[in-house]
Amino acid sequence: MLLTTVLIADFEMAGRATCQRLLQLEKKIKVVGEARCGLEAMTAAAKLKPRVLLLDPSGVAGEGFSLVSTILEKSPKTRIILLSERASDADILDALSQGALGYLAKPALPAYLTKAVRAVAAGEAWVPRRMVGRLIDQLAPGQ
């Protein structure tokens, strides 16, 4: 298995530190950078081309979840996992429709972060089970 590179974009230092601490234990995952805002996330993703971007859109003034498509324009092979404490299902579904491949609530980081990073790096989706039905309804409306 190849090394999975990760960029952490979280406006809170504590959020970046938590992700860094959890991922540093993994031999096949390497954090290649950190970003504190949307502009830094876009610039770092374009420069570093990480395999996975952990993105907390809640601290991005005026951009939020719409930042996903902008980042993917600059780094199309990067796979994005949203991290948030207060995201609505509508925001998550919107970000997934723009190209994000995963969502992880911040309280679930200790239990699921490394699993989510590995899954998304492999091209799989990572969303809470409670959202699967809504995703299917969006993909196949009226069925």
Image: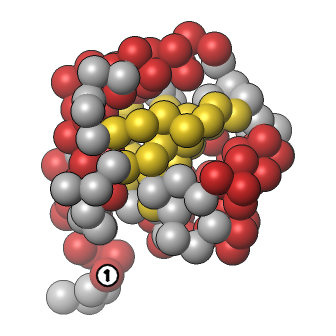
Task: Answer yes or no: is residue 86 visible.
Answer: yes
Picture residue at 45% right of the left edge, 57% below the top: 51
Picture residue at 31% right of the left edge, 81% below the top: 139
Position of residue 70 measured from the top left corner of the image (x, y, whole percent) = 72, 66
Q: Is residue 106 above or below residue 116?
A: above
Picture residue at 46% right of the left edge, 22% below the top: 20
Q: In this view, does 124 lie to the left or right of 68?
A: left
Query: Observer-nearest residue: 10 or 76?
Result: 76
Position of residue 16 measured from the top left corner of the image (x, y, whole percent) = 55, 22
Tell me which corner region of the image, top left, top right, bottom left or bottom right, holds residue 112: top left
Q: In this view, does 4 lie above or below 133?
A: above
Task: Answer yes or no: is residue 116 visible.
Answer: no
Q: In this view, does 100 lie to the left or right of 114?
A: right
Query: Observer-nearest residue: 51 or 90?
Result: 51
Say which quadrant the C terminus sits in.
Answer: bottom left
Q: Disc 1 designates what residue? A: 139
Q: Is mark 1 on a helix, strand or loop?
A: helix
Position of residue 24 measured from the top left corner of the image (x, y, whole percent) = 36, 23
Q: Mark 1 Cα within 10 Å, few/some/many (few <14, many 20+)?
A: few
Q: In this view, does 39 lie above or below 125?
A: above
